Image: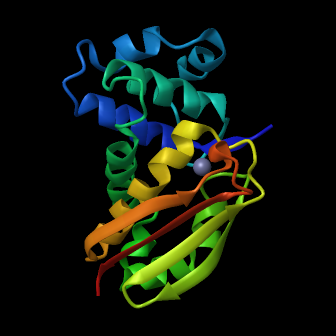
Amino acid sequence: MIQIKGFAIRGLLRYVKESDHPGGIPALLDRLPPEAARHFRTKILSSRWYPYEAFLGPLHAIDAELGDGDLALMPAIGEFSGRQDAGSIFRFVAALSSIEAIVGRAAFLWQRYCDRGRFEIAELERGRLHLALAEFPEIDRAHCALIPGWIQGLGRAVGARDPAIEQVRCIHRGDPRCEFAGSWAA
Ligand SMILES: [Zn+2]
């Protein structure tokens, strides 16, 4: 069973709260499939592990209700979450001085976020990065679509200017693994 940390789920709920979604979080939770909804009967705790569907349920509901169901909202949700995470669960990240320092610890950060997958650094130099997410063939399409935004949000939180990260390979397009690359003003 794939598990993800509660703070990832709480980031989604906070995004809904700050959006103009009619009915807010309660209305969104009402729309969840039962296997996802059951996790929301009690408060979601940031540092607890939850089954992957407790994250994917709200993520797909947001995509359908706040977006057009085409995943176009995912980078913005990722960026919002990354900024939140940098100031809360990853607040020690703020002590890291640069996006290079964060990305250098990507494998460590990912382990604290999801129990499947391993981030590998293919390239990291001043102003440029290329990362691969290995050993996570089950990653959901919506999840990998938000990761570039998440990296951007974390980067912005430590002062990276104009980060532009994209997904350059994807398991859902037939590539062997998902990869992310981009640049920022160094
Ligand atoms: Zn992907």
Q: Seen from this angle, which residue lies furthest front?
A: 174
Q: Which percent across, then down, holds residue 17? A: 27, 29
Horizontal side of residue 136 vs 127, given as left or right: right
Q: Seen from this angle, which residue lies furthest left?
A: 20
Q: Which percent across, then down, holds residue 13? A: 38, 32
Q: Which percent across, then down, holds residue 94? A: 36, 74
Question: Can see residue 46?
Answer: no
Total numbered labels: 0
Return the residue nearer the eye: 112 or 78: 78
Q: Going 28% across and 19% down the picture, which residue do you hit?
A: 24
Quarter of the view holding residue 42: top right
Horizontal side of residue 38 vs 62, given as left or right: right
Q: Quadrant of the N terminus?
A: top right
Quarter of the view holding residue 39: top right
Q: How is the image coloured?
A: rainbow
* Residue 107 vertical placement versus 12 (above, below): below
Q: Which percent across, then down, holds residue 58? A: 48, 26
* Residue 8 vertical placement versus 149 (above, below): above
Question: Can see residue 31?
Answer: yes
Return the residue nearer the eye: 2 or 163: 163
Horizontal side of residue 72 vs 41, given as left or right: left
Q: Going 42% across and 29% down the picture, which residue do you hit?
A: 70
Q: Going 56% across and 33% down the picture, which residue do you hit?
A: 55
* Residue 149 vertical placement versus 51 (above, below): below
Q: Quadrant of the C terminus?
A: bottom left
Return the residue nearer the eye: 76 or 115: 76
Horizontal side of residue 175 vs 169, given as left or right: right
Quarter of the view holding residue 126: bottom left
